[in-house]
Image (tube, rainbow, N blue to C red):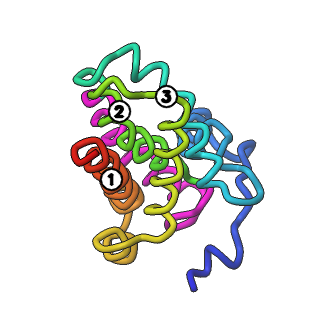
Amino acid sequence: MDINTLHKPPIIFKEMTWSERFIVFCGVGFGSGLAPKAPGTFGSAFALLFIPLWLMLGFYASVAVIILMSFIGIYICGQTAKIIHVHDDGRIVWDEFAGQSITFLPLIYLGEMSWLWALIGFALFRLFDVWKPWPIRVIDQRVDGGFGIMFDDIIAGIWAALCIAIYFYFI
């Protein structure tokens, strides 16, 4: 068991520079990752608020923004981990924002977004993010830094998106 799951150092914003505060605030999902229980679930739920933006942008622009969000997230997650002195703390949920958003891409492409599908996508992403089937578990265990923090959630989002795409393709 990781030492960070046994003891999480408190995040003390007043001891940070303004730029560090901004980075950590983004890294903890604008505060959604500070929930005392299940911060990843709260971060993923917060990402549901992005659905209107993805619908407004359309499929191709959403893909571009999610890619940008992911690259920026490598920096944000890595720096947040360094600033709060943790490896991959559950309070860092920017990665959930990107992974959860990837889940919805097939629904945006097909024009099938609804609240029911948003909840199904949410559940699928959380399933893959918690269960960590191959290759998610390998990435989570072996890849460090911001890239490692982001990449396992990106793969979880891709797995969830594939499940949705397969459903629409075969049904």
Q: Quadrant of residue 132?
A: bottom left
By secondary structure, the bulk of the magenta-drawn segment is best described as: helix
Q: Quadrant of residue 151?
A: bottom left
Please give left or right for residue 131 compared with residue 141 in the image.
right
- Category of crowding for the residue at label 3, using alpha-carbon neighbours closer than 10 angstroms: few (below 14), some (14–19), many (at least 20): few
Separation of residues labelled 1 and 3 (CA atoms): 16 Å
Label 2 SS: helix
Q: Which residues are magenta?
A: 63-91
Q: Which residue appears at 37% of the width and 72% of the height?
A: 133
For the residues bearing labels 1 and 3, Cβ distance under 8 angstroms: no
When the figure is inspected, residue 121 is found, relative to residue 92, above or below; the finding is: above
Residue lying farthest front?
171
Q: Which residue appears at 57% of the width and 86% of the height?
A: 1
Q: Is residue 66 found inside the magenta-colored segment of the image?
A: yes
Separation of residues labelled 1 and 2 (CA atoms): 11 Å
Label 3 SS: loop
Kindly identify the amino acid type of the residue bearing the numbered disc 2.
Leu
Please give left or right for residue 94 compared with residue 34 in the image.
left
- The image's mark for residue 107 is 2
The image quadrant where one finds the C terminus is top left
Q: Which residue appears at 71% of the width and 50% of the height?
A: 34
Q: Which residue is mark 3?
A: 114
- The image's mark for residue 163 is 1
Q: Earlier in the sequence, mark 3 or mark 2?
A: 2
- The image's mark for residue 139 is none
Kindly identify the amino acid type of the residue bearing the numbered disc 3.
Ser
- Give the x, y percent position of residue 52: 49, 20
Kindly identify the amino acid type of the residue bearing the numbered disc 1.
Cys
When the figure is inspected, residue 61 is found, relative to residue 20, above or below; the finding is: above
Q: Which residue appears at 38% of the width and 77% of the height?
A: 141
Could you say which is closer to the camera, residue 52 or residue 93?
52
